[in-house]
Image (tube, rainbow, N blue to C red):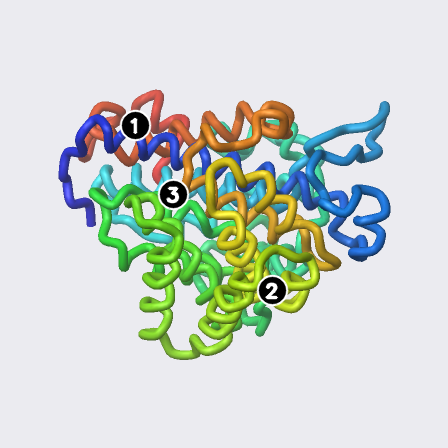
Amino acid sequence: MKTGRTPERHELESYRSRVRGSLLGGAIGDALGGPVEFWGLDRIRSECGRDGVRAYLPENVEGGHAYGRITDDTQMTLFTVEGMIRASVRQDRGLGFTVGVLHHAYDRWLDTQLQDAPDGERDGWLINERWLYSRRAPGNTCLSALEVPRAGRRKLEQFGTEATNTSKGCGGVMRSAPFGLVPPWVWPAGWQFDAATEAAGYTHGHPTGQLASGALAVLIGALVRGSDLSRAIDEALGQLRARHGHAEVYQAIKQAAEIARRGPSPEHIESLGGGWVAEEALAMAIYASLVYPEPNQLLDALALSVTHSGDSDSTGAICGNILGALHGETALPPELAFDVEGRGTILTLADDFVYEFTSSDRLHGDYGPYTRWTDRYPGW
């Protein structure tokens, strides 16, 4: 699947900034929206002002208050990144690339929700990050779908198969941005849609829940290649039209673009839904991004994306993914970026993702032996 083209240095610099921007931006949006996820718009305005949520709100934790805490959205996105690196390592070991490796990555995330701390039974480094062992309102659909392959410990033949539920919740799309971050000189753009759709299907069985994930991946991928936001949306819509069952996602995105012409308003974003299902979460994030598309407006966009009565952390995370990929990490609000939980882990994973997809031959090589890199990212 790899094309093997060697990118120019300026391409690499831009690419790294967009990867870091998208992953850290998603975490910032997630952390902004998390505390107000179950608040109504009137309460948000009462406690945060008419401009909405523009700073991290304190959350009660043992020993005091915490600011900038991420939720399951960012947790699962990080395991998506790790799984994609492992899948690439697997390919270079001659075992072939399979998106099914992501199912195992989500199974490792499930450990962080069921256990208090690492048990030493799993390989790789991310599973040993103790701060990830915390339940942050994980979606019931993700939990129940991922528990299916476990019989005793695990029933391996069930990995890589689609969930049997009919859910179109936002738990698939909110973790799918990394599929769009694979550089354009490595794999063809069409791959992104199919891979994101398949991976979302491990937990969400409804076509809408899957196709929204594919659309986000294509949108992110177009931004990474240097497209403006409008052209990236058009590319996502074009890919959607070729898929059976695309109508709900397609119409939601079109509606977001139409409403964006009316300008910024929490009432406008709420007219797109609550964000609890995939097409609504994606549409609401796209709306906020279109209303405030400039680099110096990124905080305005994030604030708008979470200032509503719905699933604020998911809409904020997706908005941050989109605008971080569009503008790069230097556009992120520094007063939020420095204080977001897990920043070191997020940026380390972002850099490792870039290393793997730009310099894998220097890390482990085609069909190469095990190295410190493959200890860090085993190919399964």
In this view, 294 is above or below 288? above
Q: Which residue is mark 2?
A: 169
Residue 365 percent across, percent down from the top left: 20, 29
Determine the image quadrant of residue 10: top left
Q: Amino acid at mark 2?
A: Gly
Q: CA distance from mark 2 to mark 3?
A: 22 Å
Question: Could you tell me if the residues under marks 1 and 3 are in contact, i.e. CB atoms within 8 Å?
Answer: no
Give the mark, 1 or 3, whose residue is nearer the N terminus. Answer: 1
Query: Identity of the amino acid at label 1?
Result: Glu
The picture places residue 336, in percent across and down from the top left corner, at 62, 29
Q: Nearer the viewer, mark 2 or mark 3?
A: 2
Looking at the picture, tell me which residue is in the foreground, 45 or 362: 45
- The one of 122 and 176 positioned closer to us in this rendering: 176
Label 3 is placed on what type of residue? Met
The Cα–Cα distance between marks 2 and 1, rounded to whole angstroms, is: 35 Å
Percent from the top left, x then y, of residue 283?
54, 62
Nearer to us of marks 1 and 3 is 1
Q: Is 377 located above or below residue 320 in the figure?
A: above
Q: Secondary structure at mark 3?
A: helix
At a point 27% along the width and 54% down the height, the residue shown is 189
Q: Is residue 289 visible?
A: yes
Please report the residue visible at 24 percent of the width from the left and 38 percent of the height from the top: 93
Q: Which residue is mark 3?
A: 84
Identify the residue position indicated by label 1 in the image.
13
